[in-house]
Image (spheres, rainbow, N blue to C red):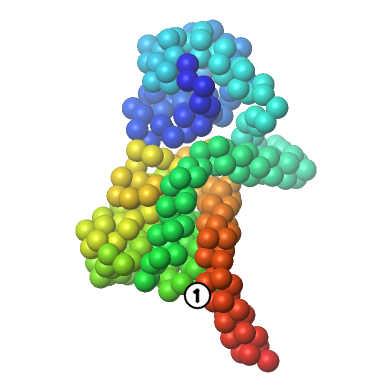
């Protein structure tokens, strides 16, 4: 079994798994403590798949069978920094709901830090700082992170736009140049308009950057530079922990640009601050 986190690997594999394997993977992610105490027949009955499917999934994770998988999973969820995403239930009191939501957000940040590729992050920061123009594409809940990145770029005096409308995304991407950067943000990486915008931007010669939770997704495939979050959430839904992980990566990008841009960034920040101050007064 790989030394990499089993739960993180399961989350990244979800969109590429066949239906039956995905059912087993989602069950593990939701109820890992139950799974480590069950024989394979009990687990297969609980998630409604065959023993063969479970063994095949274990092998996908780099192991040689279900028993070894359970040993490695037990080690992982028993470590001090492991916190399984708790599920909010209808009968939960408000105190439990609050605790579970905070726990999920904390774990999303921990998991995202584990998968953050610092080399890719460095390349992304350099590309954004050098860009003539930065256009950001997102749909739905990912629009929050897109707007925040737009705002952060503008603070640094970088010409940027956030496009949340699919038609505007196509128009923007088609006119980018090799001096520009196109960024696609999508938790699932499955939004076809975001993927198409990055494809068009890439075809125009622009540097493309993606921020998704799934490496084997269409959005990630169109990126020259791929950045990842890692959170527990159904690929088709953007949960609060997904958005917070995306925003955390945006904050890292911003702070890295401040450090790498140094004098240029400080000078532009000063101009922006003076303009805002003069407008308010």
Residue 44 on image: x %, y %:
47, 14
* Residue in front for this viewpoint, 72 or 26: 72
Residue 62 on image: x %, y %:
42, 18
Q: Residue at x 53, y 27 (%)?
A: 5
Residue 262 location, quadrant: bottom right
Q: Is residue 217 visible?
A: yes
Q: Residue at x 35, y 38 (%)?
A: 216
Q: Is residue 230 visible?
A: no
Which residue, as the protein is rendered here, is positioned at the far front?
263
Q: Residue at x 31, y 67 (%)?
A: 179
Residue 113 higher or lower than 32, as above or below: below
Q: Is residue 245 left or right of residue 49?
A: right
Find disc 1 in the rendering and name its residue.
157
* Residue in front for this viewpoint, 191 or 20: 191
For the C terminus, the quadrant is bottom right
Pointer 1 local density, CA inside 10 Å: few below 14, some 14–19, many at least 20: some
Number of callouts in the render? 1
Which residue, as the protein is rendered here, is positioned at the far right?
95
Residue 6 higher or lower than 85, as above or below: above
Q: Residue at x 41, y 31 (%)?
A: 13
Residue 56 higher or lower than 139, as above or below: above
Q: Is residue 37 left or right of residue 14?
A: right
Residue 229 on image: x %, y %:
50, 44
Which residue, as the protein is rendered here, is positioned at the far left?
203
Residue 48 on image: x %, y %:
44, 19
- Kindly state the secondary structure of the residue where label 1 is placed: loop
């Amino acid at each position: 079994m790989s030394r990499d986190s089993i739960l993180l690997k399961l989350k990244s594999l979800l969109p590429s798994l066949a239906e039956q394997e995905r059912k087993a993977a989602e069950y593990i992610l939701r109820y890992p403590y139950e799974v480590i105490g069950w024989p394979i027949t009990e687990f297969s009955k609980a998630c409604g798949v065959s023993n063969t499917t479970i063994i095949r999934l274990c092998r996908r994770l780099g192991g040689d069978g279900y028993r070894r998988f359970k040993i490695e999973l037990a080690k992982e969820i028993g470590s001090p920094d492991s916190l399984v995403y708790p599920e909010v239930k209808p009968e939960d009191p408000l105190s439990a709901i609050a605790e579970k939501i905070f726990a999920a957000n904390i774990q999303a940040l921990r998991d995202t830090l584990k998968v953050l590729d610092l080399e890719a992050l460095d390349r992304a920061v350099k590309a954004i700082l050098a860009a003539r123009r930065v256009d950001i594409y997102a749909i739905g809940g990912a629009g929050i992170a897109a707007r925040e990145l737009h705002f952060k770029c503008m603070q640094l005096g970088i010409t940027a736009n956030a496009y949340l409308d699919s038609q505007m995304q196509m128009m923007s991407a088609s006119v980018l140049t090799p001096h520009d950067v196109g960024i696609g943000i999508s938790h699932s990486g499955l939004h076809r308009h975001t993927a198409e915008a990055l494809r068009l931007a890439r075809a125009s010669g622009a540097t493309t950057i993606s921020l998704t939770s799934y490496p084997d997704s269409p959005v990630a495939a169109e990126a020259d530079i791929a950045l990842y979050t890692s959170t527990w959430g159904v690929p088709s839904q953007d949960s609060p922990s997904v958005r917070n992980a995306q925003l955390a990566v945006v904050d890292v990008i911003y702070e890295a640009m401040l450090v790498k841009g140094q004098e240029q960034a400080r000078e532009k920040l000063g101009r922006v601050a003076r303009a805002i101050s003069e407008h308010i007064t």
